[in-house]
Amino acid sequence: MNRRILFALLITCATCIFAARPNVQFGPEGVTVFDVRPGTKVAWISLTRTRVAEHTSLRIDRGVEVATPSKKAVIARPDADKSRALWVVAAIDDDIAGVVTSPRYSGSQIPIAVTSAPGSDTISITSPEIELMYVRPNGGAWFIRASDGGLGDADGRQDTLISVPLQSLERVQGNPHPPDSLHAGDMILMLDPRGNRTAVIKVGE
């Protein structure tokens, strides 16, 4: 008997117009992306909400996993609670991207406004806080955690806008230094922990 439970997929319009939906399933192995070419690198960010006594704790995980010869990549930490969680996923070496939620759980449908013009060296996001992973197809992945007027916001002002220079991004698991400018086709994976919002944006579209 196949015990895998297919995840409900919440794909934003920005996602579905440019990339194939990831085939993500929940099973004994955890949270797994299936049907990806062996050797393909899969970048991901996850937000997990866990009930602890009288409050809810938030946990952010991220990573880049390599698809096995059996065409799958596990995208969750072994000890993470997967019952109330969101994932933003993109294949670095393939045109696959999307937003995934655990069964019986849903994120906000309010979009995340982003300015990301090809040739620019900065990404602007309208959000109080953001977890961001920048993916260059066949190039690499970089991330940053930023808050409006605080850590990671280049202008340092509380003005509802987070400005993220590409050179401030951190390398993920041995990737090269971040790029100098945005290229058309690059992907931006975002997760707003406060608003439970997610987005996948393709630069130039």
Image (tube, rainbow, N blue to C red):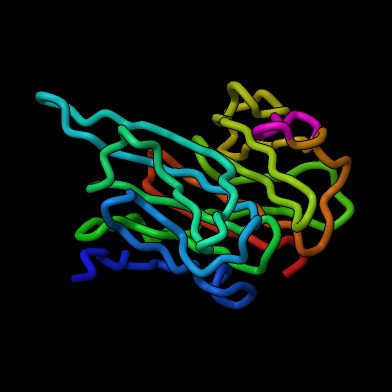
Q: Quadrant of the C terminus?
A: bottom right
In this picture, residue 100 sits left or right of residue 125: left
The part of the image, by quadrant, that contains residue 156 is top right
* Residue 72 is inside the magenta segment: no
The part of the image, by quadrant, that contains residue 152 is top right
Q: Residue at x 58, y 69 (%)?
A: 14
Residue that extends furthest to the left in the rendered view of this protein: 53
**Residue 31 place in picture, x, y as percent:** 36, 52
Q: Residue at x 80, y 32 (%)?
A: 167
**Residue 55 place in picture, x, y as percent:** 17, 27
Residue that extends furthest to the front in the rendered view of this protein: 69
199, 93: nearer the viewer = 93
Q: Quadrant of the N terminus?
A: bottom left
Q: Residue at x 31, y 32 (%)?
A: 79
In this picture, residue 115 sits left or right of residue 78: right
Q: Which residues are magenta?
A: 167-174
* Residue 173 is inside the magenta segment: yes
2, 61: nearer the viewer = 2
Q: Is 93 situated above or below 30?
A: below
Q: Residue at x 46, y 53 (%)?
A: 198
Q: Is 20 situated above or below 75?
A: below
The part of the image, by quadrant, that contains residue 18 is bottom right
**Residue 15 place in picture, x, y as percent:** 56, 68
Looking at the rendered structure, the number of numbered marks drawn on it comes to 0
**Residue 126 place in picture, x, y as percent:** 57, 46
